[in-house]
Amino acid sequence: MSSPTHNTKTLNPLARFKRITIKIGSALLVNDLTGTLKQSWLESLCADIFALRQNGFELLVVSSGAIALGRGILGLRSGALALEQSQAAASVGQIALGQAWASALQAHDLAAGQILITPNITEERRYFLNARTSINTLLELGAVPVINENDSVATAEIRYGDNDRLSARVAAMVEADALVILSDVDGLYDAPPDQAAKGTSPARHVPRVEKITPQILAMAGTTSNNNARGGMVTKLAAAQTATKSGTAMLIAKGTKLHPLAGLMKGGRHTLFVPDPATRAARKRWILGALQVAGTVTIDPGAAEALKKGKSLLPVGVRHVSGDFSRGDPISIVGPDATELARGLAGLGSNEATKAMGKKGPEISKMFGPGHRTELVHADNLVLVYSEK
């Protein structure tokens, strides 16, 4: 059984990551007593996001707060809400939340892209691919995706139930390097701090978790905040999902202004180390565990681009064979008919045939401006020769 270590580091814990998902809890965004937005806090966070973007980071946000804001706007009582009241509060609050994010990011010339997610989006392949493409496109266009569960239509039976677990699913879906959960605590403790304070032994902060074991799970406590549906239990569940997907997860305190800046300066946090074998396993899965549904033949220029880690674009394709759909595994062969790579198709075989030999603008004109233009994205492509 793995045990947590208790040494601390002052280095920027985000420095080695590029794509980061940031999860914001309701208690950080919304005043629990008044039901109003903490405007200064949101503005300071968006300033941090801008600073990270300027340094080459890709950032997306999973934001709670819709129900909490809607509760305040509608004047609903404190305490637990009935499902229909939660749905109504979410419907009203989602508009306010989206406007708040758009305004705070616009102050730094950043656009916010709102995405509402229900569980079937990350569970069903077609919806999964569409959601991932939408998020990746927003990032490529320089926008900041702001994601939340669609609480206005979700039922108790089908909802995620908290945005901790949702953020982990999103981070895994977009293959984020790290998930940062900003909370009212600065990480995991070996006992709930409030309970330990009543006893003789103080709770000890756990700065690093190599593996989530029963011992680690036993450290979780509960939450008493009216606007929060999570707690350490859900954060550890999120950590399990994230780390098994190859994504590191950090829990850090977000109650002060500029929480990300504080974290980058070495602020106290808990790092959950990702499973190092996960991403290599995914590459092996694409390469060997799938039977290809089709084959595309590419020209020498495209072959060289693939070897440099680029995506496969239709302009470099010379022939398409097979009947495949978007998301299906396909084989990529060079001019000499030697297999160079395998990957997951971003276009179906009919679309690929029509797009073959054409550049991005032509493809956008053919299928519409919102249509993807890669046949196989670099994230979903494995070079055959590099695995031998």
Image (spheres, grey):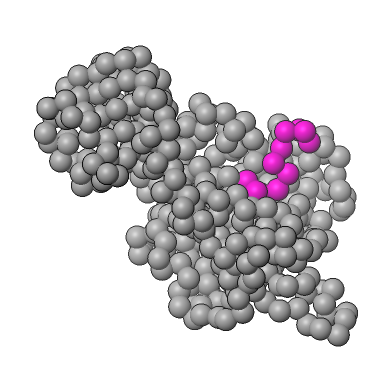
Quadrant location of the N terminus? bottom right
**Residue at 78%, 41% in the rendered image:** 86
Quadrant location of the C terminus? top left
Spot occupied by residue 84 in the image (x, y as percentages of width and height): 82, 34
Spot occupied by residue 382 in the image (x, y as percentages of width and height): 32, 40
Q: Is residue 321 magenta?
A: no
Spot occupied by residue 271 in the image (x, y as percentages of width and height): 56, 67
| Residue 184, picture quadrant | bottom right
> In this picture, which residue range is highlighted in magenta?
155-166
Q: Nearer the viewer, residue 310 or 337?
A: 337
Q: Nearer the viewer, residue 210 or 8?
A: 210
| Residue 201, picture quadrant | bottom right
Q: Can the viewer see residue 180 in this picture?
A: no
Q: Nearer the viewer, residue 307 or 37?
A: 307
Q: Is residue 166 left or right of residue 135?
A: right
**Residue at 69%, 41% in the rendered image:** 160
Q: Nearer the viewer, residue 94 or 248?
A: 248
Q: Is residue 156 magenta?
A: yes
Q: Is residue 24 left or right of residue 261?
A: right
Vertical order, 82 against 290 (above or below): below
Q: Can the viewer see residue 384 in this picture?
A: yes
**Residue at 27%, 35% in the rendered image:** 341
Vertical order, 191 against 79 (above or below): below
Spot occupied by residue 176 in the image (x, y as percentages of width and height): 46, 51
| Residue 118, picture quadrant | top right
Vertical order, 211 against 148 (above or below): below
